Image (cartoon, rainbow, N blue to C red):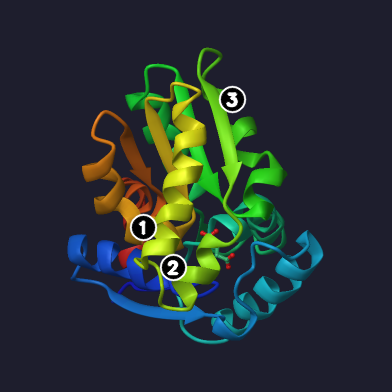
Amino acid sequence: MLKIWILDSGMGWHYALLDIKSHFPQYEYETYLDHANAPYGNKTGEEIYRLTEVWCQTLWSKWCTLILIACNTICAETMRKLQDKHTDKKILGCIIPSVEVAVEISQGKIGLIGTNFTVNSGKYEREITKISDTHMLFPLATPELAGYVEKGIAMHRYTLEYLDIRIAELLEKNIDTLILACTHYTVYYEYLSVKYPPIKIVDSARTQTIKLGEYLGKHTELFT
Ligand code: DGL
């Protein structure tokens, strides 16, 4: 049986798992989350790498076929290092899936909200540039948001006001697409889709599910 581990810093795992499991109920899932150290978005690259490496060592010592890193913050810097170090393991991230979907559906101006670390890493810009020379990215850090979701006040009036103010900044840039570059923000997918209907919302939990399906279709050896 294919066993997939989903890693995230905190509540984001919940949304990632819900989406993936609803599409692929036939596989076995485990989740690994680091509530104690969340949020990761305000840490340094070294701290994030050290924490993630400990998780991965733990998971490899158990029976695990595939690790899905659902956390954009981890993927922004650490994933490539992990893949280079553990070349015999299957580790999939969540940034490239969102970039591919956003470039496919956007007319040209893509907004992004994410943690400090994800935004400052420039990873999304670099990946977009690799596949398009016409799309522009407008990234905006929303460093408090993941913490609000962790505290259970994601839909509190003041939290939504904070979110709306940040979205207004991006709307001034005439974006047509918005990437939710943090799995914690999946909780806002419906809210934003209903409130800002012309804007196409790209949610990293959902795009990771789409790309996982494509990946599994090509890697049938994982089932043997
Ligand atoms: N859910 C994580 C992400 O996708 C970040 C939350 C955190 O700051 O720990 O980036």
* Residue 47 horizontal side relative to residue 94, left or right: right
Is residue 29 placed above or below 36 in the rendered structure?
A: above
Q: Quadrant of the C terminus?
A: bottom left
Is ligand 1 closer than 8 angstroms to the Cβ of mark 2? yes
Residue at the spot 51% in from the left edge and 61% down from the top edge: 145
What amino acid type is highlighted by mark number 3? Lys
Mark 3 — residue?
130
Mark 1 — residue?
186
Residue at the spot 44% in from the left edge and 17% down from the top edge: 108
Q: Do callouts 1 and 2 mark residues in contact (Cβ within 8 Å)?
A: yes
CA distance separating discs 1 and 2 = 8 Å
State which mark lies toward you, 3 or 2.
2
How many other residues sit within 10 Å of disc 2, few (<14), some (14-19) or many (≥20)?
many
Is ligand 1 closer than 8 angstroms to the Cβ of mark 1? no
How many other residues sit within 10 Å of disc 1, few (<14), some (14-19) or many (≥20)?
many
In terms of sequence position, does the residue under pointer 3 or pointer 2 come before the other? 2
Residue at the spot 48% in from the left edge and 75% down from the top edge: 150
Q: Nearer the viewer, residue 14 or 67?
A: 14
Disc 1, SS: helix
Label disc, if present, on residue 12 of the rendered structure? 2
Disc 3, SS: helix
On the image, the x and y values in percent for residue 173 come to: 50, 23
On the image, the x and y values in percent for residue 137 come to: 55, 28
CA distance separating discs 1 and 3 = 26 Å
CA distance separating discs 3 and 2 = 27 Å
What amino acid type is highlighted by mark number 1? Thr
Residue at the spot 46% in from the left edge and 83% down from the top edge: 63
In terms of sequence position, does the residue under pointer 1 or pointer 3 come before the other? 3
